[in-house]
Amino acid sequence: MAHSQNSMELPININATQITTAYGHRALPKLKEELQSEDLQTRQKALMALCDLMHDPECIYKAMNIGCMENLKALLKDSNSVVRIKTTEVLYITASHSMGRYAFLEHDIVLALSFLLNDPSPVCRGNLYKAYMQLVQVPRGAQEIISKGLISSLVWKLQVEVEEFQEFILDTLVLCLQEDATEALGSNVVLVLKQKLLSTNQNIRSKAARALLNVSMSREGKKQVCHFDVIPVLVHLLKDPVEHVKSNAAGALMFATVITEGKYAALEAQAISPLLELLHSPMAVARLNATKALTMLAEAPEGRKALQAHVPTFRVMELETYEKPQVAEALQRAARIAVSVIEFKP
């Protein structure tokens, strides 16, 4: 006769590292208690459960209200690497939501995270970089990183981290430099970015060029780009096989050639020919950047002379239409200004 018997083994689809969480409104308060537990395994399991919950913005709001963020800040100093890794993962997930970014700013998480920039665990550092990258998607987040004096550290880490992390750092720096490049310019950022322009990784080349574009918005940035001979490298990138790289390189040249030194450095590097080729790029922003860069070069007598024969190209651009009215207006206006500068007679 058949009879039933309970197995002593766990079902194969049960993860023994997962903690059993409370239901409903008790879930987060219970996890908050367990985050403070002296038992290592309890802290680890609580963090794993929190990683799942924090994908929900409502949970982030509740966690912030009951004080979980302060507990997470404390766990960043935990001696156990798994605890630090899972804590930074929770914070990275949190920073991917607008409510989470607010929590970062409200509880000064940016500075607390910065103490892990030299953590021995690559996973921990990777989560940190991704958290910063998410945070700077809003201007206040970028301003927070700048105000804490972390730009110099990020510029340094850009030189020593693996390529995957370099991309995260560049994404962060691009938006921080857009807010204020002062600290970066005092940290040899132009020299570091020049090195990254030569990377075999197309994403790194593109993002480094974009960062240089933002650096070159300031007068000091323009001067450093010229002083450190970055312009010939940017001109070389105008022939890159990747459209985004060419577009960002043209954008950086657009700003760097505002000053006389930049104009003549670009003319000496023979920037006109590749910039003219970029006027036929499938990317509207690449065409716009190239048009504006050529306009800057046309302000120099030598550049104006070289571009005289290409006025018809700009005339055609003035008449072109595009699906997006804003794009059409920007390109037509840029082409019109280019023609007026090229045809200017002193």
Image: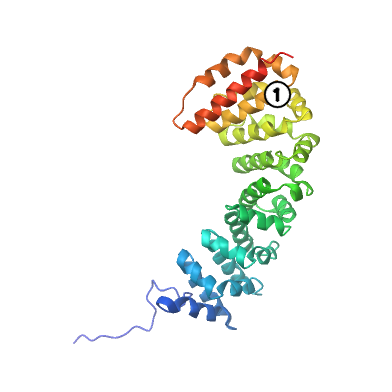
Q: Which residue in the structure is indicated by mark 1? A: 297
SS at circle 1: helix
Q: Residue 204: x and y, percent? A: 63, 43
Q: Residue 86: x and y, percent? A: 56, 68
Q: Is residue 234 visible?
A: yes
Residue 20 is left or right of residue 308, and the answer is left
Query: As displayed, is residue 189 above or below residue 345?
Result: below
Query: As displayed, is residue 128 above or below residue 340?
Result: below
Query: As displayed, is residue 340 above or below residue 18?
Result: above
Query: As displayed, is residue 138 above or below residue 77?
Result: above
Q: Quadrant of the N terminus?
A: bottom left
Residue 10 placement: quadrant: bottom left
Amino acid carrying mark 1 in the image:
Leu
| Of the pair 13 and 254, the residue shown nearer to us | 254
Residue placed furthest toward the right: 227
Residue placed furthest toward the front: 346
Q: Quadrant of the C terminus?
A: top right
Q: Residue 299: x and y, percent? A: 72, 22
Q: Residue 191: x and y, percent? A: 76, 42
Residue 5 is left or right of residue 183, and the answer is left
Residue at (71, 19) in percent of width and height: 303
Residue 312 is left or right of residue 307, and the answer is left
| Of the pair 139 and 232, the residue shown nearer to us | 139
Residue 183 is left or right of residue 125, and the answer is right
Q: Is residue 21 visible?
A: no
